[in-house]
Image (spheres, rainbow, N blue to C red):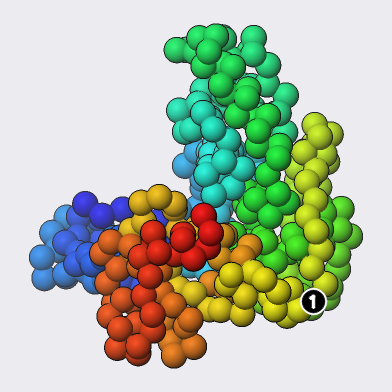
């Protein structure tokens, strides 16, 4: 009973409803459907057709030309709002303590949160009207939201849900432009001239900051005092030559970690001058390996690449 979110994969494998499929472990232990088994297909099976409407709001959907994914075109889609806010609050982004998935669902279901900025407008009294929320719980939520105001620009950018902008790209953009206003005023050419920012990323970032929905997000956040800045690094090569522990090193992270999530470890590497890579090669400085590291660990050993445990890595990072 595998669930496929990748419609391109469905079409490529010629899957039918009720098919028997072969599933293998991939990535961060995410099931990947490798193939269908047509000979075991039921006579009553019917082809899986890509949706034409969003199942949540009924709006038209569109396939992204650059990927096999299908997106709802409605910026006010309730399901998109729900997932965007959960992502925004999650540990690798704004890391808002005590605002987990259940809390986000309650806030949206009660109409208290319709934008990211609404989180910062919440009051103690409003929270007391939610099921299961008492005085202390409400205070913890308000305190967690207040603490998140101290997060850097890179964490905010990572939380906005801009296509192609993950933790590392967010950090690169934040330390190059320094502010939301700096990013808003940047042209596609200026964005793509930044080291490691390709044309697709540059266009995606430009489109976000120049379409009405993106501009509204930024304006709303600034109106509630969420407008972080970061020190601009004008020469990344020079900055990497300083006293940072991972300066000019290429590091790969794999396996299951216990003390930090992988995005947080990768963010730490970037902050400390290193470069995160998804594959092991002779140029890899070292591999950080958690439990069940798999093929990357095998390749590192075969190439003679140093392997560090999570504890050893944190010690090297000075944590």
Q: Is residue 59 above or below residue 210?
A: above
Looking at the image, the residue that sits furthest to the left is 40
- Residue shown at 44% from the left, 90% from the top: 282
Q: Position of residue 223 (x, y in %)?
A: 84, 34
- Residue shown at 79% from the left, 68% from the top: 233
Q: Is residue 74 left or right of residue 282?
A: right
Q: Position of residue 26 (x, y in %)?
A: 31, 67
Quadrant of res 89: top right
Q: Position of residue 227 (x, y in %)?
A: 80, 43
Q: How many numbered discs?
A: 1
- The answer to whether any part of residue 284 appears in the image is yes
- The answer to whether any part of residue 206 appears in the image is no
Callout 1 secondary element: loop
Q: Is residue 74 left or right of residue 183?
A: left
Q: Are there few (<14), some (14-19), or many (20+) residues within 10 Å of tag 1?
A: few
Label 1, on which residue?
235
- Residue shown at 80% from the left, 51% from the top: 229
- Residue shown at 70% from the left, 49% from the top: 152
Q: Is residue 159 left or right of residue 51?
A: right
Quadrant of res 308: bottom left
Q: Is residue 223 left or right of residue 116?
A: right
Q: Is residue 55 above or below residue 141?
A: below
Q: Is residue 192 above or below residue 179?
A: below
- Which of 88 and 52 lies nearest the eye of the viewer? 88
Q: Position of residue 200 (x, y in %)?
A: 67, 73
Q: Is residue 76 above or below residue 3?
A: above
């Amino acid at each position: 009973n595998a669930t496929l979110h990748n419609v391109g994969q469905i079409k490529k494998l010629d899957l039918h409803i009720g098919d028997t499929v072969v599933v293998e472990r991939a990535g961060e232990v995410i099931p990947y459907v490798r193939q269908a088994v047509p000979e075991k297909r039921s006579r009553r099976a019917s082809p899986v057709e890509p949706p034409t409407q969003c199942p949540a709001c009924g709006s038209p959907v569109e396939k992204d030309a650059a990927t096999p994914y299908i997106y709802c075109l409605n910026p006010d889609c309730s399901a998109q709002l729900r997932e965007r806010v959960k992502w925004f609050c999650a540990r690798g982004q704004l890391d808002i303590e005590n605002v987990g998935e259940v809390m986000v669902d309650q806030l949206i279901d009660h109409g208290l949160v319709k934008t990211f900025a609404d989180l910062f407008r919440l009051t103690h009294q409003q929270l007391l009207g939610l099921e299961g929320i008492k005085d202390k719980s409400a205070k913890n939520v308000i305190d967690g939201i207040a603490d998140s105001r101290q997060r850097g620009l890179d964490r905010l950018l990572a939380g906005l849900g801009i296509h192609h902008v993950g933790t590392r790209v967010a950090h690169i953009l934040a330390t190059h432009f320094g502010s939301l206003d700096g990013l808003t005023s940047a042209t596609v050419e200026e964005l793509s001239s930044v080291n490691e920012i390709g044309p697709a990323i540059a266009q995606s970032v430009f489109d976000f900051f120049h379409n009405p929905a993106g501009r509204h997000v930024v304006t709303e956040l600034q109106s509630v005092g969420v407008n972080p800045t970061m020190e601009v690094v004008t020469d990344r090569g020079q900055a990497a030559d300083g006293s940072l522990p991972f300066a000019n090193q290429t590091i790969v992270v794999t396996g299951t970690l216990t003390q930090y999530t992988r995005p947080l470890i990768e963010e730490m590497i970037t902050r400390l001058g290193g470069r995160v890579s998804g594959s092991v090669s002779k140029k890899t400085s070292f591999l950080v390996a958690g439990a069940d590291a798999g093929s990357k660990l095998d390749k590192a050993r075969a190439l003679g690449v140093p392997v560090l445990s999570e504890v050893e890595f944190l010690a090297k990072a000075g944590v």
